[in-house]
């Protein structure tokens, strides 16, 4: 993925919480809308702060008794004493400073790309988005592709996705295994770079 967009201005909006994008893209160009398992928050939450949890998780794993974790290494909130939980969307998900920061960065990136005075060619690339939360990525992407002259929408998904009629000339749908599609795309781009096309 990183190789395909190399040299372009990129921003990642993701509903994945698995930290995979962080392995290849800078943190400040990612908005983890549904949280990130790499952080803990207070389960209440009683205060607005998230905490990197890698060391705590490693310690918990080292102390496992069979399939169980003793209660001692379980992380507690240093403010209220309640248990800490992964910073991942549920009823008590903390939409605090860090979450808002991600959304603001995403919105400013869009503004910079899509406003008239800065209008550029914008590719809205949707990768493997399911039907659970269309309001976060899919529907806003449709709207942006429709409303902005320089925007084009590409949907890559395992299965056939719904394709709205009004995006007929502003969209492309590629079904199939995402890893294979991206691999093929990389090869095609390499070929083109090689022939100078
Ligand atoms: Zn607390």
Image (cartoon, rainbow, N blue to C red):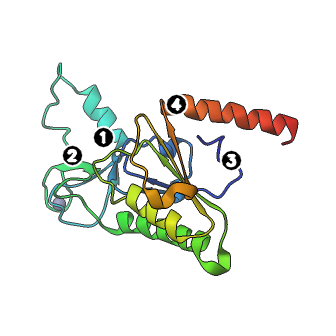
Vertical relation: 131 (above or below) 192:
below
Q: Which residue is at a point 55% across and 28% down the rendered structure image?
A: 180
**In whole angstroms, how far apart are the C-alphas of marks 2 and 1?**
7 Å
Label 2 element class: loop
Residue at image mark 3: 6
Residue at image mark 4: 179
Residues 195 and 39: in front is 195
Residues 11 and 76: in front is 11
The answer to whether the residue labelled 2 contacts the one labelled 4, judged by CB atoms less than 8 Å apart, is no
How far from the left and from the top, in percent, is residue 186? 67, 35
Instruction: Mark 2 or mark 1: name the one nearer the start of the chain.
Output: 1
Residue at image mark 2: 75
Q: Can I make out residue 184 in this image? A: yes
From the viewer's perspective, is 60 left or right of 27? left
Mark 3 against mark 4, which lies toward the viewer? 4
Residue at image mark 1: 56
Task: Using the rendered view, name the quadrant where residue 72 is placed.
Answer: top left
Vertical relation: 126 (above or below) 98:
above
How far from the left and from the top, in percent, is residue 97? 35, 69
Label number found at residue 164: none
């Amino acid at each position: 993925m990183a190789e395909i967009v190399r040299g372009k201005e990129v921003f990642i909006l993701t509903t994945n919480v698995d930290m995979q994008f962080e392995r290849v893209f800078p943190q400040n160009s990612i908005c983890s809308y549904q949280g990130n398992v790499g952080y803990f928050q207070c389960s209440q939450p009683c205060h607005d702060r998230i905490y990197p949890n890698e060391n705590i998780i490693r310690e918990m794993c080292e102390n496992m008794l069979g399939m169980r974790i003793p209660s001692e290494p379980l992380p507690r909130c240093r403010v209220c004493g309640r248990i800490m939980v992964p910073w991942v969307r549920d009823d008590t998900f903390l939409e605090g400073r860090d979450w808002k920061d991600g959304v603001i960065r995403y919105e400013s990136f869009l503004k910079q790309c899509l406003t008239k005075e800065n209008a550029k060619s914008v590719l809205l690339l949707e990768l493997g988005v399911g039907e659970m939360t269309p309001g976060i990525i899919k529907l806003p992407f449709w709207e942006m592709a429709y409303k902005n002259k320089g925007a084009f929408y590409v949907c890559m998904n395992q299965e056939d996705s719904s394709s709205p009629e009004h995006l007929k000339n502003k969209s492309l749908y590629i079904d199939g295994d995402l890893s294979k599609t991206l691999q093929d795309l990389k090869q095609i781009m390499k070929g083109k770079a090689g022939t100078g096309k």
